[in-house]
Image (spheres, helix red, strand yellow):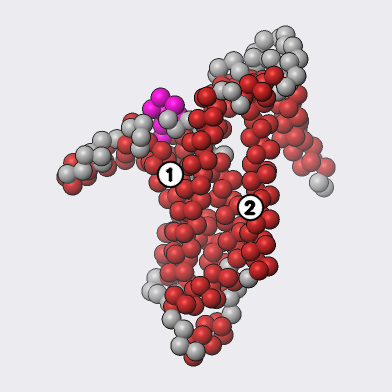
Amino acid sequence: MTIPALVLFFLFHTFPALQGIFYSFTNWNGYSDAFDFVGFKNFANIFKDENVIHSYGFTFKYALLMTILTNVISLLIAVGLNAKIKFKNFFRGVYFLPNILSVLIVGFIFNYLFANVFPVWGEKLGSELFSQNILGNQTWAWTGIVIVAVWQGIAFNTILYLAGLQTIPQDLYEASSLDGAGKLREFWSITFPLLASFFTINMVLAMKNGLMVFDQIVALTGGGPGRATQSIAYLIYTGGFQGGEFAYQSANAVIYFILIVAISVLQLKFLQKREMDL
């Protein structure tokens, strides 16, 4: 029963990945018939390319901030939705809604808002910064991408944190209440430690998604203005499929794959050690 799935996975995932690794050692431009083997030349040139280094810098800055904001906000929302409030199920559905929407659709909607709605509000509030389309500002364009990613990303993380909160025995809160512990003390001594495994999952997934940011870039800025918001994934796509740098960007993709795996492993090792310490 698993053979058809394995064959399809190999044909459309594993085989293209192996092809990419093969071409990373060549000078193939992506469309010609001939190519030559150049060894590790592409890999060496990656570390000398200022455009690539800038893309790495932007991507890591974006991924780090997005990961922190997404997890902090989603954890606070989950704690609020887990409390005894009216219309609890309704609010849970509302907060999960962004997760079922297409990233591109959300990006195009926010693109319109940043260009036509928010500047009007900014003018009424007398704000010089928000009276313009920040996506067209080289200094602030990346913040618009972070806002969209966080708004959509908190939906999934909130659901995971809510699932984790359901596993915490209420007896612990009753005992802490009898001991006179406040809500903040309960959170740091009971809630947060017992959510350690869910925190690990959310941090790793959020960082991975942040490092692989692509759809938001396409829908919001196209890597601009200039190259201010050019992520690594977007650079690999445009350079490899549109710029005649297929082999060169394949080498970039191989390096980036190794980097993402390394970061994920380090995250898991550090956060799981924290789970055992707790």
Q: In this view, does 43 lie above or below 271?
A: above
Residue 38 lies in magenta, yes or no? no
**Nearest to N terminus: mark 1 or mark 2:** 1
- Relative depth, front residue between 93 and 234: 234
Q: How crowded is mark 1: few (under 14 residues within 10 Å), some or many (20 or more)?
A: many
- Relative depth, front residue between 68 and 12: 68
Identify which residue is drawn at 60% across, 52% down.
204
Identify which residue is drawn at 79% across, 37% down.
7
Q: Mark 2 falls on what kind of element?
A: helix
Position of 44 with respect to 123 (left or right) is: right
Q: Which label belongs to residue 267?
A: 2
What segment is highlighted magenta in the picture? 220-227
Position of 273 with respect to 109 (left or right) is: right
Majority secondary structure in the magenta region: loop
Residue 248 rendering spot, x and y as whole percentages: 64, 21
Position of 141 with respect to 245 (left or right) is: left
Residue 224 lies in magenta, yes or no? yes
Identify which residue is drawn at 69% across, 19% down.
41
Q: Mark 1 points at which residue?
A: 146
Q: In this view, does 38 lie above or below 214?
A: above
Q: Distance between the residues labelled 1 and 2?
A: 21 Å
